[in-house]
Image: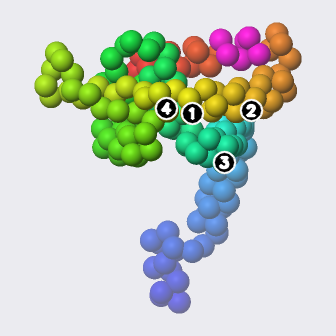
Amino acid sequence: MRGQAQDRAQGKGGHGQVEAATRRGDEAAHAANSPLVHDFGLLLKAATRLEQRIDTALRRECGVSHTMFEVLIRLCRQPDEEVSQRRLADDLTLTSSGITRLVDRMEEAGLVRRVPSPGDRRSVLVDSTDHGRTVFLQAAAVHADLVERYFVAPVPHDDHGRLTASLSRIHEALRED
């Protein structure tokens, strides 16, 4: 008997602890089923599934990953612009070592080339090659088809404008913090 009394006194076992655990379970279920958790989960799942579809198609049809395609978008956007690896890392939210490894793979595949920065010997610039621009054009068509099919077509036209405006506001809010 003495052991059970000590356990109860220390909060081990007993009716009160069961009630507290039940209450925490109910509160946890309520939090897990909240509209915020649900809505954010939908956003994550949709974005993840779309990114996976795009990545799979780009790898299969063009031999590049979605991230490589994003680098090529950035490099092809303004052909004469000099883009540093650091700027690419910032634009793509990659670490310094992550962008280095990615550019290494892209350079080996003949998609990009590194050039020394004329203004800063410590900085390396990245430029797309002719082959990289050819692959980019092929990949851009694949990408456009999938984005149209899964991001544009399922949403009514008026809602799509509001969706993209809302995503832009979210993006800006996150950049400011």
Q: Residue furthest bottom?
A: 1
Please report whichever mark, 2 or 3, sits nearer to the chain's N-terminal start: 3
Residue 43 visible in the current orientation: no
Cα separation between marks 1 and 4: 5 Å
Q: Please name the amino acid that badge 3 sits on.
A: Arg
- Main secondary structure found in the magenta portion: helix
| Local secondary structure at mark 2 | helix
Q: Residue furthest front?
A: 130
Please report whichever mark, 1 or 2, sits nearer to the chain's N-terminal start: 1
Q: Please name the amino acid that badge 1 sits on.
A: Val
- Residue situated in front as seen by the camera: 28 or 129: 129
Q: Compared to 145, does 11 lie above or below?
A: below
Query: CB atoms at circles 2 and 3 under 8 Å apart?
Result: no
Label of residue 60 in the image:
3
| Local secondary structure at mark 3 | helix
Please report whichever mark, 4 or 2, sits nearer to the chain's N-terminal start: 4
Q: Please name the amino acid that badge 4 sits on.
A: Gly
Please report whichever mark, 4 or 3, sits nearer to the chain's N-terminal start: 3
Cα separation between marks 1 and 2: 17 Å
Cα separation between marks 4 and 2: 21 Å
Cα separation between marks 4 and 3: 16 Å
* Image: magenta residue range: 160-165
Taking the spot 57% from the left edge, 14% from the top edge, the residue there is 169
Nearer to us: label 2 or label 3: 3
Residue 132 rendering spot, x and y as whole percentages:
49, 32
Taking the spot 57% from the left edge, 38% from the top edge, the residue there is 66
| Local secondary structure at mark 4 | helix
Nearer to us: label 1 or label 2: 1
